[in-house]
Image (cartoon, rainbow, N blue to C red):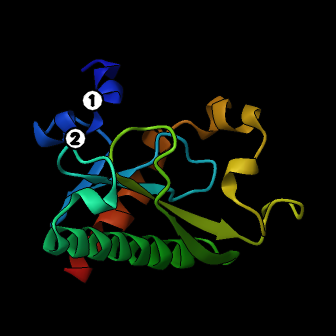
């Protein structure tokens, strides 16, 4: 499998070809983030690549997407709390500034983060941290993937 899934994340998820998919939820796909700068970072992808914003969805699907976001957030929270005593909270964000499809970021936050960043948006982390190979999603994250997936199953 090539990295083509990165250019069509939703289409490849629908076809079962996106390796980051944790679970199929009601209105989207729970995926683990490509970058594990903060361990457990996950994303909820809407299940229709034409949907650009939350308001594009009919009310019932909109509420389902928000419920999926809540479910993924709770799964990351439970997993992070169990795996790291320094876990603080989860931040949920629907931004849409870069990717043209609806998605929600689920960021676990930790006490061990740099003091000048711990209370600020994750996007303020230096760019070199985002591209540092040590934070690239890989086999070392398999236990984390499994744990978040297990929590998603328990929450359903």
Q: Residue at x 43, y 72 (%)?
A: 73
Above or below — where is 141 with respect to 116?
A: above
Q: Is residue 39 left or right of residue 110?
A: left
User: For mark 1, what is the residue?
Assistant: 8
Q: Quadrant of the C terminus?
A: bottom left
The percent position of residue 57, horizontal first and vertical second, equals: 20, 61
Label pair 1/2, CB-CB below 8 angstroms = yes
Q: Residue placed farthest to the right in the image?
A: 116
Q: In the rendered image, which quarter is residue 70 located in?
A: bottom left
Above or below — where is 42 with respect to 34?
A: below
The percent position of residue 63, horizontal first and vertical second, equals: 24, 76
Q: Is residue 145 left or right of residue 132?
A: left
Q: Residue at x 78, y 62 (%)?
A: 113
What's the mark number on residue 49?
A: 2
Q: Residue at x 88, y 64 (%)?
A: 115
Q: Is residue 148 left or right of residue 132?
A: left
Q: Closer to us: mark 1 or mark 2? A: 2
Q: Residue at x 35, y 69 (%)?
A: 69
Q: Nearer the viewer, residue 129 or 83?
A: 129
Q: Earlier in the sequence, mark 1 or mark 2?
A: 1
The percent position of residue 29, horizontal first and vertical second, equals: 24, 54
* Residue 126 seen anywhere in this rendered image of the structure: yes
* Residue 24 seen anywhere in this rendered image of the structure: no
Q: Residues within 10 Å of mark 2 (few under 14, many from 20)?
A: some
């Amino acid at each position: 499998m090539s990295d083509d899934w990165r250019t069509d994340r939703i289409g490849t998820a629908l076809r079962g070809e996106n390796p980051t998919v944790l679970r199929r939820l009601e209105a989207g796909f729970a995926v683990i983030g490509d970058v594990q700068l903060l361990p457990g970072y996950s994303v909820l992808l809407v299940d229709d690549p034409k949907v650009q914003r939350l308001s594009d969805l009919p009310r019932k699907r909109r509420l389902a997407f928000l419920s999926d976001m809540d479910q993924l957030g709770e799964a990351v929270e439970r997993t992070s709390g169990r795996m790291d005593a320094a876990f603080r909270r989860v931040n949920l964000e629907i931004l849409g500034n870069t990717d043209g499809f609806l998605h929600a970021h689920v960021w676990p936050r930790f006490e061990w983060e740099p003091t000048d960043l711990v209370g600020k948006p994750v996007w303020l982390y230096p760019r070199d941290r985002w591209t540092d190979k040590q934070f690239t999603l890989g086999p070392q994250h398999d236990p984390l993937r499994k744990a978040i997936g297990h929590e998603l199953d328990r929450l359903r």
